[in-house]
Amino acid sequence: MTMLHLERIGHSFLGRTVLDGIDLEIAPGELVALVGPSGSGKSTLAHIAAGLVEPRQGRVTRAYRQHAVIFQEPRLLPWATTADNIAFGLKRQRLSRTERRERVLTVAARVALEPADLKKYPAQLSGGMRQRAAIARALVAKPDFLFFDEPFTALDVALKRRMQDIVIDTVAASGHCGLFITHDLSEAVRIAHRIVVLDGNGHGILGSRSVPLVPGTRDDAMVFETVQAMLGHDRLFAHVNDCDERSVA
């Protein structure tokens, strides 16, 4: 069974082909990391898969019940408290006030937010706390598929690692499915079951590699050695760090 199936997806901006002939399947319980050169269309593909952008060609088939998206920026409502921002994900569900509060408290604890943090406004939170609130907002409605659009790019190394641990604990090790967009191969190796490489010239998926072991069991030495092997000996990753500033993400 496939939870997400992209078939022959194509897209362009201002007459320039960004994506062409993209085929991708994600299985139940699988977290896939999508990497590729800067400007290769990774975020565009994620937005198409999530239904935020309509593709010019191809078809998206979703077999999951509900999904949520975590963007590069937290995108919290500045006039709402952290608790109200998280509860925004429950807007369409008919829950009592008590049920909403319990759901918010539970998911906040999962992302290491304290009860006192829930009374604060976004401007009173650190960058890492804002991103944790965004993750909590995505998780609170209990989606069975999550899209991550380079959510930790702006965070420092320590905060990024903590956020990766949250992804591993709440998604990869919990039976959820997901598509994680990243330009950081070390991040992909650390959190994903499989890494898919997108061609930088809009020519589709170049290939994929399964990552040894399971997320949460890979130590720093294993991650480092795996990344070095990929970059040094696997032609699939030869251009993954290329950059084209004229292109879209």
Image (spheres, grey):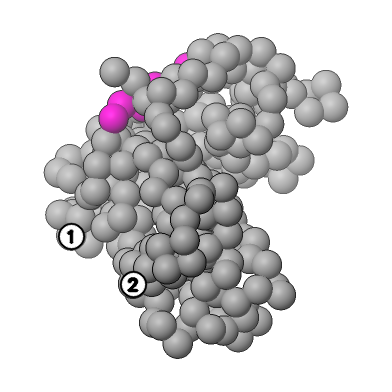
Query: Which residue lies under the disc numbered 2?
Result: 109
Instruction: Find the distance from the CA under tag 2 to the CA under tag 1.
Output: 25 Å
Q: Which residues are magenta?
A: 22-28
State the image quarter where residue 38 is shown: top right
SS for dot 1? loop
**Residue type at mark 1?**
Asp
Viewer-nearest of discs 2 and 1? 2
Horizontal side of 14 relative to 71 (left or right) equals: right
> Mark 2 vs mark 1: which is more N-terminal?
2
Q: Is residue 19 visible?
A: yes
Q: Main secondary structure of the magenta part?
A: strand
Q: Quadrant of the N terminus?
A: top left
Badge 1 is on which residue? 219
Q: Amino acid at mark 2?
A: Ala
Residue shown at 72% from the left, 38% from the top: 247
Based on the picture, tell me whether residue 185 belongs to the magenta stretch: no
Q: Residues within 10 Å of mark 2 (few under 14, many from 20)?
A: few
Quarter of the image that includes the C terminus: top right
